[in-house]
Image: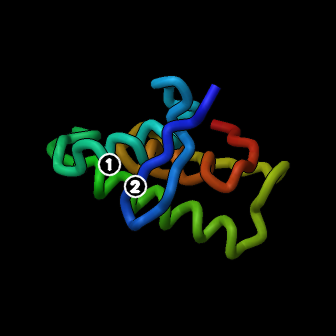
Amino acid sequence: MEAAEGVLAGGLKSTAVVDGIVTTVADIIRYNAALRPEAVALDFEGRRSTYARFDKRASKVANALRRDGAGPGARVVFFAKNSDWYYEAYIGAARPTPCWSP
């Protein structure tokens, strides 16, 4: 089983797609940001985010968590109403591989 490697948003390399299958939830956003960056990923109460914007904002969450010491095994708790921001935080938290507790 070989991973399909490609260049994604921000010049990141990915081995997320294995035999045509995206391997993680966070990889779905990166994959779509590379494939169709201007397509609408989120539409909530009149706020629309493209896959490129969604990917960028999720990366900001991931980078902030890493700066604060979150890494493998870390627990992240997010308390809020459902919104587009919830999904950006969820995907961002999935990137540095902490445990997510919705």
The correct choice, above or below, for 24 with respect to 76 in the image is: above
Q: Position of residue 46 (x, y in %)?
A: 15, 44
The quadrant of the rendering that contains the N terminus is: top right
Q: Position of residue 20 (x, y in %)?
A: 46, 25
Amino acid on which the number 1 mark rests in the picture: Ala
Q: Position of residue 68 (x, y in %)?
A: 72, 73
Observer able to see residue 47: no
Q: Confirm or deny contact between disc 1 and disc 2 (CB under 8 A).
A: yes
Q: Residue at x 78, y 49 (%)?
A: 75
Residue that numbered label 2 is attached to: 8
Q: Position of residue 69 (x, y in %)?
A: 78, 70
Residue 33 is marked as 1
The quadrant of the rendering that contains the C terminus is: top right
* Left or right of 90 on screen, residue 1: right
Q: Secondary structure at mark 1?
A: helix
Q: Residues within 10 Å of mark 1 (few under 14, many from 20)?
A: many
* Left or right of 51 on screen, residue 20: right
Q: Residues within 10 Å of mark 2 (few under 14, many from 20)?
A: some
Of the two numbered discs 1 and 2 in the rendering, the one whose residue sits closer to the viewer: 2
Task: Choose between 101 and 24: the one closer to the eye.
Answer: 24
Direction right: furthest residue:
73
Amino acid on which the number 2 mark rests in the picture: Leu
Q: Secondary structure at mark 2?
A: loop
Direction front: furthest residue:
2
Q: Measure the alpha-carbon separation of dots 1 and 2.
A: 7 Å
Q: Residue at x 68, y 48 (%)?
A: 77
Q: Which is nearer the N-term, disc 1 or disc 2?
A: 2
* Left or right of 5 on screen, residue 10: left
Observer able to see residue 15: yes
Q: Residue at x 50, y 34 (%)?
A: 17
